[in-house]
């Protein structure tokens, strides 16, 4: 719709960098930025010019140690992040991927140290796992990628024009985020398990762990710990297993969509 930044492709919500324009003779129009950075990579991932092979997945369970993240009466976000991260690690290893964890215990790792850990590895992708806080009525799953240079962040009205390291991966970031959001919301396991989460969209942000990553990178928010119903669901092994399996399936779908195969390691 005109003047909206929300767009749906394959019934999935994307938040555009610029509002849709209503041209008097040409009708609704999207910006060149959104055409090249969102629409094209989603609809034609094999056309991503700088797509590259990967065999390593860097898993970043958010928070840890004295940084508990979001808390509720049931548990701490840091603990759930780590639980899902470990489950994802085991699934990816079984599928033949090499896996690096930014943390595998309840310890504090500074944001830039997480980036440094990720950037030590070649041919990798980066997935940061989090859960949300936003009041008792807020619900759903959202996946973030780095906002392209010169565009505003979904989390801020400010525009930052400096070119940030990592923007070369814009198209791959969106393709990876699309696979993750799709499996979390409408994947085969979501249908089988009867898990139906609200689609809060694929968004752009300048989180510190995304800004200087040299690899395709996303940050996924798996639900709201501040919502009473979602808090109970998130705390269950069922949901944590579902999220880990959905992320693993998304990684494999993303790799396949780029026209690549997994090279198994011993």
Image (tube, helix red, strand yellow):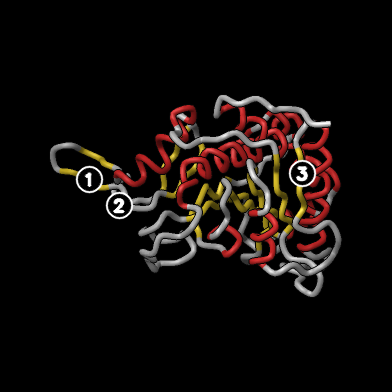
* Upstream in sequence: badge 2 or badge 3: 2
Is label 3 in contact with label 1 (beta carbons under 8 Å)? no
Q: Are marks 1 and 2 in contact (CB under 8 Å)?
A: yes
Toward the viewer: 236 or 264?
264
Going from N to C along the chain, the mark reached first, 3 or 1, is 1
Disc 3 designates what residue? 99
Q: Is residue 14 above or below residue 115?
A: above
Tell me the crowding category of disc 1: few under 14, some 14 to 19, or many 20 or more residues within 10 angstroms, Cα based: some
Most foreground residue, 80 or 54: 54
Circle 3 or circle 1, nearest the eye: 3
- Total number of numbered labels? 3
Instruction: Say which mark, if any, is on residue 14.
Output: none
Depth check, front residue: 107 or 130: 107
Secondary structure under the numbered disc 3 in the rendered image: strand
Q: Give x and y (percent) for residue 241.
A: 81, 42
The residue carrying mark 1 is 22
- Separation of marks 1 and 2 at Cα, in angstroms: 8 Å
Give the spatial CA distance, label 3 vs label 1: 46 Å
Residue 138 at what x, y percent from top left?
61, 59
Measure how far apart labels 2 and 3 are at the Cα level: 42 Å
């Amino acid at each position: 719709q005109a003047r909206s930044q929300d767009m749906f492709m394959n019934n999935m919500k994307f938040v555009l960098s610029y509002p849709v324009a209503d041209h008097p003779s040409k009708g609704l129009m999207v910006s060149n930025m959104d055409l090249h950075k969102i629409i094209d990579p989603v609809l034609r991932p094999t056309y991503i010019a700088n797509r590259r092979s990967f065999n390593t997945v860097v898993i970043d369970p958010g928070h840890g140690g004295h940084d508990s993240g979001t808390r509720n009466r049931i548990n701490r976000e840091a603990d759930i992040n780590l639980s899902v991260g470990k489950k994802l690690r085991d699934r990816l290893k079984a599928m033949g991927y090499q896996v690096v964890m930014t943390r595998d215990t309840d310890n504090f790792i500074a944001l830039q140290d997480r980036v440094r850990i990720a950037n030590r590895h070649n041919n990798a992708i980066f997935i940061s796992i989090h859960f949300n806080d936003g009041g008792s009525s807020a619900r759903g799953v959202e996946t973030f990628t780095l906002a392209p240079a010169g565009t505003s962040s979904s989390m801020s009205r400010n525009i930052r024009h400096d070119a940030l390291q990592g923007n070369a991966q814009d198209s791959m970031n969106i393709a990876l985020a699309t696979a993750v959001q799709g499996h979390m919301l409408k994947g085969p396991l979501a249908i089988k398990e009867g898990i139906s989460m609200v689609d809060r969209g694929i968004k752009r942000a300048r989180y510190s762990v995304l800004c200087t990553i040299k690899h395709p990178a996303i940050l996924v928010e798996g639900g709201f710990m501040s919502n009473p119903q979602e808090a109970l669901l998130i705390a269950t092994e069922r949901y944590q297993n579902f999220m880990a399996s959905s992320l693993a399936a998304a990684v494999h779908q993303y790799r396949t969509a780029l026209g690549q195969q997994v090279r198994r390691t011993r």
